[in-house]
Amino acid sequence: MNFLKAEIENKRKFLENIHSEEQEQKKKKYVRRSDVEKKREQQYLAEQAEIEKKREERKRQKNKTLLLLAEQEKAEKSASDSEGQKEEYDGSDTFNISPEEVVRRLRAKGQPIRLFGESDKDRKTRLRALELIEERTEGQRNDFMRTLEEMDTNLDLEALKKQQDEEESRTSKKKKTTEDSVLDNTPISIELLEKDPDKLFVLIYTFLRRLIREWEQEMNNRPDHVKRSVQGKLSAATQKQTNEYMQPFFRTLKKKSIEPDVLARVTEITHYMQKREYMNANDAYLRLSIGNAPWPIGVTMVGIHERSAREKIFSAQVAHVLNDETTRKWIQSIKRLMTFCQSKYPPEDNSQLMG
């Protein structure tokens, strides 16, 4: 109420002043609204001019302080430049490598060997920074990218010559085994699951091993320009990764410690691959990977109420691909071997081609 009374009083005094001025000038008993608005506008403009002056004064003071701070920073930088140069020289001595090695490492990382206006010292510093970043993010990189980088480093001319010499010696020793096709080996029969499972372990091991060896031989027999292309590097990295992923499966085959249902599915896959029935082999692969379970992710308890299809949910139907990471990798590698086998030994009937 006090605030309202004060505002009313100010309004009354304002009108009285205007009324007195008008009476003195024109001796009239009334005040025009346009005059009131004009007076108010003049008062508003005067207030804005004062605010603008104060704002300009603040800006001037702020600029002065910024100039003082900049001068102080320049003085500190000039004092610390000499110390920083000494530290840089000390750091360059610890990372002392030849310019050829710097160029090789930068090319292996897919980086430009020299930026515009970059000195040898700056180039070493950039390489060191890239290597430190890679060391920090080493745990976040996947296996395929690591394998691909290894393939890039192994494509030197000297390494290729050595590999060719080794391949010639190997092919001379294994000429008898490579002349015959992998599919012409002892047939893998599904009936061996009941008759002689121990023989089945040996047959599956031999078949998949020879298939990986043929894939590796095909990668090595490609021309040099194909090996160095992007697609060629990806294919070689996929083959090498498949070989690594299959090692745990081969160890379980040697120990004969594979689960019976998994052995049955792998037997079906290799059996149909030998017969070049890749569509049936793909169906067996799907039963191995995701199974025919209504809950392939392993859910066996879905609530407190009994459902109509509850009897179909049990642990034997859980998909093996989701059991652990190692199993997922060798199952995926079997699929890659199926694709390679189909490309090298196509079926006579196109209806047996898998997509």
Image (cartoon, helix red, strand yellow):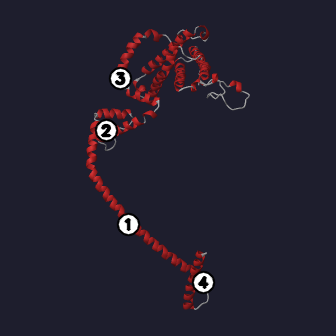
Q: CA distance from mark 3 to mark 4?
A: 102 Å
**Can you identify the residue that label 3 sits on?**
159
Task: Answer with mark 2 or mark 1, whichever residue precedes in sequence.
Answer: 1
Mark 3 Cα shell of 10 Å, populated few (<14), some (14-19), many (≥20): few
Classed neighbour count for the residue bearing mark 1: other residues with Cα under 10 Å, few (<14), some (14–19), many (≥20): few
Q: Where is 339 relative to 22, above or below? A: above
Number of the label disc, if any, that sits on residue 124: 2
Q: In this rendering, which labeled residue sits more in front, label 2 or label 1? A: 1
| Residue 266, horizontal then vertical, whole percent | 57, 17
Q: Residue at x 61, y 89 (%)?
A: 29
**N-terminal label among 2 and 3:** 2
Residue 241 in sight from this viewpoint: yes
Marks 4 and 2, how far apart at CA = 83 Å
CB within 8 Å, label 2 to label 3: no
Question: Residue 194 is drawn in which quadrant?
Answer: top right
First-in-chain label (4 vs 2): 4
> Which residue is farthest front?
2
Mark 1: amino acid: Gln
Kindly identify which residue carries mark 4. Answer: 32
Of the numbered discs 3 and 4, the one sitting upstream in the chain is 4
Q: CA distance from mark 1 to mark 3?
A: 70 Å
**In this view of the protein, which residue sits in the foreground, 120 or 54?**
54
**Pointer 2 and pointer 1: residues touching (CB < 8 Å)?**
no
- The residue under label 4 is which amino acid type? Arg
The residue positioned 71% from the left and 24% from the top of the image is 311
Residue at image location 65% in from the left, 25% down from the top = 293
Q: Secondary structure at mark 1?
A: helix
- Give SS at disc 4: loop
Nearer to us: label 1 or label 3: 1
Amino acid type at image mark 3? Ala
